[in-house]
Amino acid sequence: MHPISFSLAIHNHQPVGNFDHIIAEATDRAYAPMIAALERHPRIRLALHYSGPLLDWLRPHRPDILERVRALVSRGQVEILTGGYYEPILAIIPDADKVAQIRKLTRVVAEEFGYAAEGLWLAERVWEPHLARPLGEAGVRYTIVDDTHFHAVGLDEDRLLGYYITEEDGVPLAIFPSLKRLRYLIPWASVDEVIAYLRTLAETDFRPEGREAPLDLALMGDDGEKFGLWPGTYAHCWEHGWVDRFFDALEATPWIEVVPPGDYRRAHDAGGRIYLPTATYDEMAEWALPADRAGHLAHLKHDLAAGGHGEIVPFVRGGFWRHFLVKYPEVNTMHHLALRAGAKVHAMASRPDKARALDDLWTGECNCPYWHGVFGGIYLPHIRGAAFGHLIAAEAAADAARRPHPFAVAETADLDGDGRADVRLANDVLVLTVDPARGGSMIEWDYRPARRHLGNVLTRRPEGYHTDLRRATAEGEAGGAGSDGAVSIHTTAVRVKEPGLERHLIYDRTRRASLRVHLMPADTTLDRMWRDEQDELGGFATAAYVPRLEQTSREAWVWLNRRAQVETGQAAVERGLGIAAGEHGLVHATRVGWEGETPLRAAWGEEWGLGVFGAPGEIWVEAEGRRLSLHEPGELQAAQRVAVTEAHSGLSLTFHLSAPASVWSFPLITISNSEGGFERNYQGAVLVFRWNLDLAPGGSWEQTTRCKIASPAPRG
């Protein structure tokens, strides 16, 4: 047995757009208690990371926290990690943004804490080999990834101590493995169990070539919120004293030296060279898989371990982080908006408006709404909406700098990376992205004055954990989220925040968007539409249209055409979507022609996905003096003027129909799993205008919808 060094790297972060009361709770229950514990235990030396969004909140709300951390830094007890300022997934943003975001946080760390940060917290430990070069160019000397990455190249546990060196284009970077076993033990297991595990590591004796001493550093990097904010952990860590007992034990154990990773790197040689594959932590790799595969992977690993083949488990890997861009098309829309806006912003002349636009761009790159696992991510509308808002503001600033106002433009380009041309209509007020190949749907609907993606809804889709919810509900094993005791997020226990959540497990067959149109049997009901069980005739809701652009000095249009067999004849649909320079609204015109031997009797539906949010009494649709909450399915009859209101923000959408229509509305409700348990999420609403069609052979039907938008300018 040899002495061992032990490093803790605690990562503290709150998403852009999170609610003040949640950040305050995290501060009071996790961040501040940990600082107090360090003040009580001056021999415990570790690394802390505070993301830019959290620092931006702490500065005006809790400056005392920053002062106390600065005192810990000044006495050599804490080293501060840098990172991307707004906590982006560095692998998917352009190198210019990588380097600039890191340098921004490094500069702020120096100003706030008087510390020259050399280590980097890698958001979600998403590693891709090319990162070594831009990180090194930004002044980073080391980073931390999970041991999963090291297992993937064949390293056993005795080699997962200390750090290794990698490079890209000759630019070196030190990489520390964070031990999964320590993540699972701390703080859930007893203090004795943690110390016992550290003893097993101290009994290893791997000596890399060229190094006389064995590898001797065990590191755990994990979220600070696990020490007080996760369910039951405040009582466990602070009221019952787990952290103080742990720190006491570390201080009392002579063969353990608690040291920050940066100090260790400066005093010890690396374990050798290494080249790691693309990877993230185990759980994230499972979450990135399609829903039906994630569960299979977990069962496979369990069966291998139970069958005596545990040595194979480290080589059984999950998915690739970037697959979230496929799994959730809404994430891909956000990502490509960031790329599009970024290219424009970087091309701006260096002026104050460019600096503001860059900051909006970087803020919109915050990783939290770009994925989903145990934490809400893309399922949290306010986090999703905040990212869209900043990206919309960045693109608007860039367009304002390069185009005379007012303007209107129509253009085609591959706007989502699928190899097919999309259509973009833009003016100084709106940006509309239309996907002709997928039902001619409008997947992006950016209203620049309010910095709102008005189509910010989320598709109801199956998740792997829905199987667990159904099973636990059927077997009576679903517990309340307020159950006593600290429960690790890594447990398989099912906790629910309210009973009956399984009733909301309704799934959409295609992505929810605006301006999908439906040719349906005449007897289609609201209930079938809400459950996405309606019969679709001719594929007009999902199949491809042929686009044609028109542009004048003041207007931009896309015309979409599709012909399809319907029963014994052919239906021909022409749709036009148009905007005008300076206008706060859009026009959608439809013509349905029928060529058949017998009349066509059917229903026509025009669908709008509306990203409006609020309590049941704050968002509604009204027509002809009748009002319906958007939190429940409902129907309004024979209306030509339909208004949707979001009372708390002042946003209103008014639809003027050339032909009276029935109005169907229903909410999009999803069930997601979070650290606090299964919960219901309102993801916006769907409005469907419905008309009866009775077309004689050779006949046609026409209708035009004009949508007017009003909203106060955003604050701040």
Image: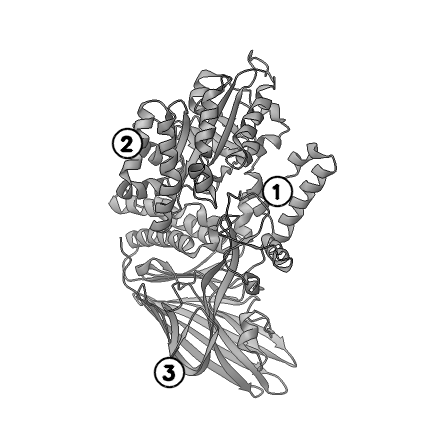
Residue 349 lies left or right of residue 566; in this view the side is: left
Disc ID at residue 502:
none
Residue 624 is labelled as 3
Q: CA distance from mark 3 to mark 1?
A: 54 Å
| Residue under pointer 1 | 318
Q: Position of residue 601 (x, y in %)?
A: 58, 85
Give above or below for 603 relative to 415.
Answer: below
Q: Callout 3 environment at 10 Å: few (<14), some (14 to 19), or many (20+)?
A: few
Q: Quadrant of residue 115?
A: top left
Q: Amino acid at mark 3?
A: Glu
The answer to whether one can see residue 182 in this image is yes
Which x, y percent locates residue 4? 52, 19
Question: Left or right of 89: which side holds 116?
Answer: left
| Any part of residue 171 in sight | no
> How many C-alpha atoms fall within 10 Å of the one at disc 2: few (<14), some, or many (≥20)?
few
Above or below, comparing residue 208 to residue 71 in the picture: above
Q: Give the crowd class for mark 1: few <14, some 14-19, many >=20 residues within 10 Å.
A: many
Q: Nearer the viewer, residue 605 or 648?
A: 648
